[in-house]
Image (spheres, rainbow, N blue to C red):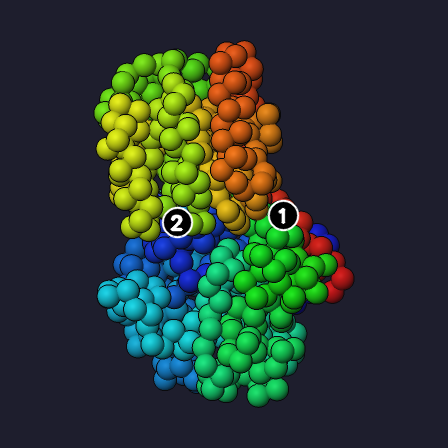
Amino acid sequence: MATSKTRNPRVLFVTPEIHPLIKTGGLADVSGALPAALRELGVETRVLVPGYPKVLAGARNKRLSHTFHDLPEADEVRLLSASLPGSGVPLLIIDCPLLYQRDGGPYQNPAGVDWPDNAQRFALLSRIGAILGSDASPLSFHPDIVHCNDWQSALAPAFLHFMPGKKAATVMTLHNLAFQGIFPPHIVAEVGLPPASFSIEGVEYYGNFSTLKAGLYYADHITTVSPTYAREIQQEALGFGMQGLLARRSDKLTGIVNGIDTGDWNPAADPHLVQGYDAGQMAGKTANKLALQEKMGLKRDPDIPLLGMISRITHQKGGDLLLEIAPQLLQENVQIVLLGTGETALENGFRNLAHAHPDKVGVTIGFNEGLSHLVEAGADMFLMPSRFEPCGLNQMYSQRYGTPPLVHATGGLADTVVDGVTGFVFEPMTAEGFFGCIQRALAAYRDKKVWGKIQRNGMERDSSWKKSAEDYLALYKSMLGGR
Ligand code: ADP
């Protein structure tokens, strides 16, 4: 499967979720957008995905490609070729009703409990990814690269490693290091990996079997979703126990920031806004601010600085820091708008804050896509004091919406916000650090010329998928260069 110098690598993208068919997190957005952007660059790409009911119902042009009869997970597994609604990206769907045809989510039953056979369910996804990347593939599409994502597809590099013959090179992308695909040791033999692989030099992880570790250990290259996060996960604080392996493989570890959907997130043509605007015509932004103030029960005033935050309200996202500085902050002439759901104690903290300051603080507990667009457009500045953030999306949306983000210097936030140029960056992660950052932003806000420049810089920043796809393509090419 050597690639000639004249053609682009062919890529099999293996993923457990894909927008717009099935989504639990950012991985679905990447899986929907990156293969489409790679195709725009002339890369032949297929996406391999499990045939959950929503995938089978939503995919277009389904046709049977092959039937496997000899796999450990099921007597009969059908592989369908299809296409993704919208972009038309070619899909390969694993139709295995025994493992995937169920109510509930991709990983959990309707009660929120992990499916007991997740090891088998995602071993099958990985196994078919490996077969399609080997010379045992029944398809005429022979990928040069098998690109795996998170623990659910992370056994593919291990399976490929132990397969004979010519094979594709493997990339393992980490979107969330907190989920590691941990199973008891006996699963190693059950999925068909050799007993010797259950070792610290292999798939063993603190006495258990980790599919994620298998991917990190056996993949030819590892990527994660920002360069800073790629460095941070080599340290104990953010390495989730994988830091030793990641540090050892640091020459094979690259950070590439995600893009955003510049169609969905376009202030000039966003159906959720009361008025569109762009960098050359900012009047519409004020109209959205007034609409947001009214919606959240705040005083309608274009001149009061309005601080917005949209997030899962968890310890990771640093909402507790905002609650801590709120008494001091609310002595200033500012308004705060928060949209989010999450930990009950923090949710209640924000409810109480809004109750105590109804004219200055508006809080909506819940998930509301439309309101999130209005907050991005209507706020003057956007708060993102995350303790860690592999990539982050809201800081990119807010720059595009002329709403400079105030971010902690971590992960993708450090890589996508330039202090004093497109937003404001603080360090260390303390109440004083955050408060000082808000003070600096408020001072800049009072100077219309300075503020307008920061807004424009952010709005003109390129956060499209094209740039990220070019980086992935360069990586694929560099991996194949030596083959
Ligand atoms: P994470 O994936 O860690 O939650 P990101 O910033 O990468 O953080 O992405 C979060 C996405 O979810 C963003 O698009 C954000 O606007 C959206 N989001 C989070 N909470 C809400 C909410 N309560 N209502 C609407 N959208 C939300």
Residue that lies at the very extreme toward the right in this rendered image: 482
| Percent of width and height locating residue 47 | 47, 59
Identify the residue position indicated by label 2 in the image. Answer: 314
* Residue in the picture at 35% in, 66% down: 107
Residue 176: x and y, percent?
49, 57
- Name the amino acid type tagged 1: Pro
- Quick one: quadrant of the N terminus? bottom right
Q: Residue drawn 62% across and 63% down?
A: 243
- Numbered circle sitting on residue 227: 1
In the structure shown, which secondary structural element does the residue marked by tag 2 occupy?
loop
Position of 82 compared to 222: left or right?
Answer: left
Does ligand 1 reach within 8 Å of label 2's beta carbon?
no
Corner quadrant of residue 419: top right
Count of marks, rendered view? 2
- 17 relative to 250 in the view: left or right: left
Q: Amino acid at mark 2?
A: Thr
Q: For this view, does 140 lie left or right of residue 79? A: right
